[in-house]
Amino acid sequence: MRYLILVVFCATMVNMASCQSNNTKTQNEAGASGAIMSTIPPDEFDKKLNSLTGVQLVDVRTPGEYEGGHIKNAQNINVHDDAFDKTVATLDKSKPVMVYCKAGSRSAAAAEKLQAMGFKEIYNLDGGIMKWEGAGKPTQAGANVPTKKGMSSADFTKLVTQANFVLVDYNAQWCAPCKKMLPMLEALAAAKKDKLTLLKIDADENKDLLKEKNISSIPYLEMYKDGKLVWSHNGAIDEEALLKETKL
């Protein structure tokens, strides 16, 4: 009886080991054959851009944004264009594709689409071209695009010293979180107009100012009191948290 139990136990253990081995093999094969989709910072993006063979660089922003400044050799395929899927289907699925937008959200969506379409190696620029430029990486503009200097630091200083409290909202037309927060910021400024002024700064039209202030992503908020910076916040925020943090 003891012998029979021992035989059954050994057979069970062998079977379990065999199943575990097969499962491990299947997982390894899936990992080896699966597509690469990675979001990487500017320095790593730059290295891969210059080292990978046959890389296909895609700017997924609007044509106007592309003309305003893009990474050299990038082709413009707007992710929100109805023809996006048809156009990217002409790319080589066996070669690396590198995508970027302004801040990273649109290119992340594009990367997911490319993966679903069967592309094998996809890299998304973390933080988009804003972080790329913030890291000192070069861009080039279209030939017919006028250079915009935007607001100078001296002009900015004058504006933030004209009221007791100045809330600075760094935003852009393409930034969905910026658009979502704007009504709240405007309502807050209206409710506290006796002491608070809202200053809206377009990130695309004031690139030099943002670079000087080391702002590489939006939404970005700052609070000045009598001309001195007393609070800053990167990313979206609701009214309750804003009031609590700024003590308005």
Image (cartoon, helix red, strand yellow):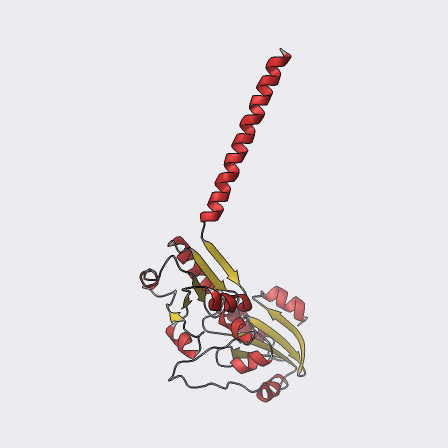
> Is residue 66 shown above or below 239?
below
Q: Nearer the viewer, residue 55 or 191?
A: 55
**Figure disc tally:** 0
In depth, the one of 42 and 166 nearer the eye is: 42
Q: Is residue 24 left or right of residue 117?
A: right
Q: Is residue 95 above or below residue 215?
A: above
In the image, what residue occupies the spot 38% across and 70% down?
75
**Quadrant the N terminus occupies:** top right
**Side of 42 where 59 appears, left or right:** left
Q: Residue 116's x, y, as percent?
A: 40, 53
Residue occupying the point 56% across, 26% down: 14
Residue 218 sits in quarter: bottom right
> In the rendered view of the protein, which quadrant contains the C terminus?
bottom right
Q: Position of residue 242 (x, y in %)?
A: 62, 68
User: Is residue 18 shown above or below 213?
Assistant: above
Q: Is residue 243 left or right of residue 217?
A: right
Q: Position of residue 132 (x, y in %)?
A: 52, 72
Residue at the top extreme of this rendering: 1
State the residue at coordinates (56%, 82%).
Answer: 209
Q: Position of residue 174 (x, y in %)?
A: 45, 71
Compared to residue 208, the image places residue 130 above or below, namely above
